[in-house]
Amino acid sequence: MRILRLGGFNLATSRFLDLIEKYDLERMIIFLDEKEAHYILDLYDTASFFGVGHLLKKLSIRKCSQLGALSKALRKAGKSVHSRFLMRMAYLNLASQLKRCDSFDAVWIGDNDFDDSNDLFVATMPSFPKGIPIIRSYKETRFIKRWEEFVTLSTVGHVIFPSRTYLDFFKDLYGLNLDKTSFADLDWRYSRTIRWVKSIETEKLSEHDHRPHVCILTGRALPDPSELRSGHRYYFIPVIKELIERGIAVHLHAARIVTDYLGRNLYAEIARSSNHFHVEKPLKLTAGSDGYRILKRYDAGILHPRIPEGNRSLQRFQQINIPNRIYEYQIADVAPLVQAGTSKEVERVIADTNFGIIFRDYDDLSMKLFELVDGKIQNRLSTEKIRSYKDFADILIQAIKTMT
């Protein structure tokens, strides 16, 4: 089987090794946007760490140039007037590359509403051989109607969603009854990395001071919730203040802390005023790095704060979203935290694995965190309960087989 992969890339590309390892896969042809090329390093470094570099012979990676000003204008116009022709013109160079590409048996497009993958599908669909299986995997989106998203979902032969709740989400948004679907989370981590992280021996910080230590693992930490797309999801100041007031230690590992309009780092200001809050360095969570040993020191991990009433677009998504960091917490024995009613799917994951804390309010959370430190709540998740990318790879390959 030869799979053509189009779309976005993100952290933890090492998970693709579980797919590449499959006997059914002869070759994986990846068209990679040059602005995301750095993400692929994790795949190569992890393969080297585990001694499976020979698997990379199955890969064929083609870098795609970013769109120029004219192409971006054509894309914007195409989406505005719902013109597939203008979209094809915007991605004319990529379409030409696809026609010169090695032969392939299936097309796999993923994974979010923000990574141009829907645009890519609309623009390049005429370049695919007639009748070829086309799979769409999906993770992040918003409850906002988009023409290119509707075209993609209503045209592809099969969609892989993280959970069944996406079906009601898109039925309510577009009136679509998506029956050719499978369910697997593309954020599940590489199976070898999971086993390696579980084998790392380290002490929890709470073993020394008997105080709960909570981690915030995030790409961004915002100074206020004003950002339109995701503001409330990355605004951690209220939850930090609630926890440190109750004597709980909080450790922020953010790839980027955004300053406010006056240039102030509000998180650093809190750290200077409290011994319970610590701004830590960003964690490099790759096989062989020290990041996982550091992560395993914490007792619990924050996902996303509650979305206030009125922000329907973001609230509907948060209910179905399973943040990718929950899988990092799971393999590192860091109990994920979620406030009741914030995310039905996160609550389901916690219930299914019996690992994590669902809390009513911050007093309830404080009590449960101290119980966790005292050993009254489970604080270790067995490897058998953790889903890996092997599971996703099996479902992807099976979906392709059912279409051929």
Image (cartoon, rainbow, N blue to C red):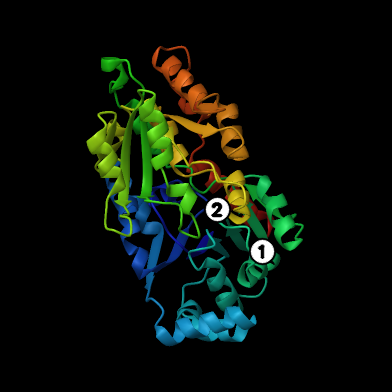
Mark 1, other Cα within 10 Å: few <14 / some 14–19 / many ≥20: many
Residue at image position (51%, 26%) is 357
Mark 2 residue element: loop
Q: Are marks 1 and 2 in contact (CB under 8 Å)?
A: no
Among the two numbered marks 1 and 2 on one chain, the one whose residue lies closer to the N terminus: 2
Taking the image as shown, residue 308 lies to the left or right of residue 283, namely right
400 or 271: nearer the eye? 271
Residue at image position (28%, 31%) is 293
Relative to 88, residue 176 above or below: above
Quarter of the C terminus within the rendering: bottom right
Residue 147 at x, y = what percent? Answer: 64, 72
Mark 1 residue element: helix
User: For residue 39, what is the image quadrant?
Assistant: bottom left
User: For residue 345, what is the image quadrant?
Assistant: top right
Total numbered badges shown on the rendered structure:
2
Residue 250 at x, y = what percent? Answer: 34, 32
Q: Say whether residue 312 is visible.
A: yes
Mark 1, residue position: 153
Residue at image position (63%, 50%) is 316
Residue at image position (56%, 84%) is 77
Amino acid type of the residue tagged 1 in the rendering: Leu
Mark 2, residue position: 139
Amino acid type of the residue tagged 2 in the rendering: Lys
